Image: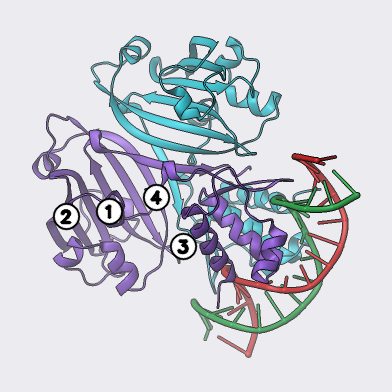
Chain colours: A cyan, B purple, C red, D green
DNA sequence: GAGTGGTCTAGACCACTCG
DNA sequence: GAGTGGTCTAGACCACTCC
């Protein structure tokens, strides 16, 4: 077995999610976990730090690792989940409609966002997301063609991410996001069921691979009444 | 000197922020840093992991630690910054107006948010934030009185956080946040310069101390045209 | 004082990149 | 093959909590 600390992490996550250990209770001590998994303390600590980072526990010096109430924030665990995962978790009816899938040179300032050469061809994918019968999210993706050479409508209808990570084996590692509110555009009106909303919430994401190359820029435009963003921020003292 | 890894972290942050090492370049290798700081590799790695977590570098196996372009997202580094720090960084004229500072029993569901006993007295602080001559943020804070026994208008005008962390020596360690868009309330209209906006962006924050006690609930209501939220999300594979 | 987590060491082996 | 980061070990000492 490789990645012992990930194994321990997953076991503990399972215990917490199944409610075997309740919020407020403490995990077995690091020493105990060492014996339990027949491993060294630093390895156990790596697993525990991952739990802490992801909001499952809080480590308290002199006491132990206290299990937090993770349930309230059970879904969108900040950040990189794709629409498909998200809608699966919500258990709602959902559908993706592909409006555009094209390959071309960057237009309208996209090359600035992607910091790529002007002759770098980009995939442009425009999709709206229907949940509960209403089209409430408009996603515009721009993806570097030198990194993802092939795309199809069926891939765009399914999940870009599972294709990129699964089929292509690329390793998405982090994203920078900005959230703002903007006036609706003509495009929004065309592709979304806006009711009488005049503004949309816009999430601009810059997605990077494990080798630190920026390969995708996404603009995700949400009808405000259906928008929700959840964040778990741990203090890292300077 | 204690906390060797924090020392190394701070040194490297300084180097990056001063532009001594440019985005795209790599840091000295872990081995070099070990010699340079006369320390063990795990300690160096702790410092580097902190840099990676905070978006300064990306570690690439077989190559090195690549410096990222941190400048584009230089401010609100996700999460726990207070209004005062934020407005200082933006370098704008700002002012805090205290509308209410009272101590009482929880009303209107606040005790649910704070998961405290119904007889737990709470501080209620209502403040609006003026930037560039306009009141654009309304902050409503609820704080457990058993943890923060004393508050004053002058503290609320300055910074709650620096008082709580500095004077009281409490250790704020993480926060859970939810961002949604809501219709304006009468209170919003009273305390904010809303122009003709009918909606506000609401950030609900649950703030925890290092010993995992939830001690504060905050509702921060922003005029949508001035709202911005920045997030750096690193993938932690399950 | 016993038990907890926080930091640190000095090694080891592996997987990966690049010339 | 040389250099890089990723994982892991078996210890050590410290700071803190709780009884």
Q: Rounded to the nearest whole Å, what is the CA distance between mark 3 and mark 4? A: 13 Å
Question: Which badge, 1 or 2, is on the more N-terminal residue?
Answer: 1
Q: Few, some or many C-alpha atoms within 10 Å of disc 2 (few <14, some 14-19, many ≥20)? A: many
Query: In the rendered view, does B163 fall on the left or right side of D1?
Result: left
Give the quadrant of the C terminus of chain B: top right
Residue drawn at the location 57% of the way across and 20% of the way down: A120
Q: Which mark is residue B79?
A: 4
Whether residue B111 is visible here, answered yes or no, is: no
* Residue receiving disc 1: B83
Question: With respect to residue A169, does B232 lie above or below?
Answer: below
The N terminus of chain B: image quadrant: bottom right
Disc 4: CA contacts within 10 A as few (<14), some (14-19) or many (>=20): many
Q: Is residue B81 visible?
A: yes
Which secondary structure, mark 3? loop
Question: Which chain is mark 4 on?
Answer: B
Q: Nearer the viewer, residue A96 or B161?
A: B161
Disc 3: which residue: A237
Locate residue A106, reporting x and y percent: 49, 18
Residue A186 x, y percent position in the rendering: 31, 12
The answer to which image quadrant residue A190 occupies is top left
Contact, mark 3 vs mark 4 (Cβ under 8 Å): no
């Amino acid at each position: 077995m490789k990645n012992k600390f990930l194994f321990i992490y997953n076991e503990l996550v399972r215990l917490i999610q199944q409610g075997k250990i309740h919020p407020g209770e403490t995990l077995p001590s690091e020493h105990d976990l060492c014996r339990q998994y027949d491993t060294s303390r630093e390895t156990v600590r790596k697993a525990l730090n991952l739990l802490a980072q992801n909001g499952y526990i809080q480590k308290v010096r002199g006491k132990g690792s206290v299990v937090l109430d993770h349930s309230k924030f059970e879904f969108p665990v900040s950040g990189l989940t794709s629409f498909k995962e998200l809608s699966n978790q919500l258990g709602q009816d959902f559908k993706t409609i592909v409006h555009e899938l094209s390959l071309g040179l960057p237009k309208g300032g996209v090359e600035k966002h992607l910091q790529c050469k002007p002759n770098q061809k980009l995939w442009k994918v425009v999709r709206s997301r229907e949940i509960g019968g209403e089209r409430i999210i408009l996603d515009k993706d721009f993806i570097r063609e030198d990194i993802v050479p092939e795309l199809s409508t069926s891939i765009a209808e399914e999940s870009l991410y599972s294709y990129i990570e699964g089929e292509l084996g690329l390793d998405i590692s982090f994203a920078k996001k900005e959230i703002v509110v903007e006036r609706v555009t003509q495009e929004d009106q065309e592709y979304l069921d806006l009711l009488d909303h005049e503004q949309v919430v816009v999430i601009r994401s810059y997605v990077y691979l494990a080798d630190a190359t920026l390969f995708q820029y996404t603009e995700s435009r949400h009808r405000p009444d259906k928008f929700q963003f959840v964040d778990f921020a741990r203090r890292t003292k300077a």
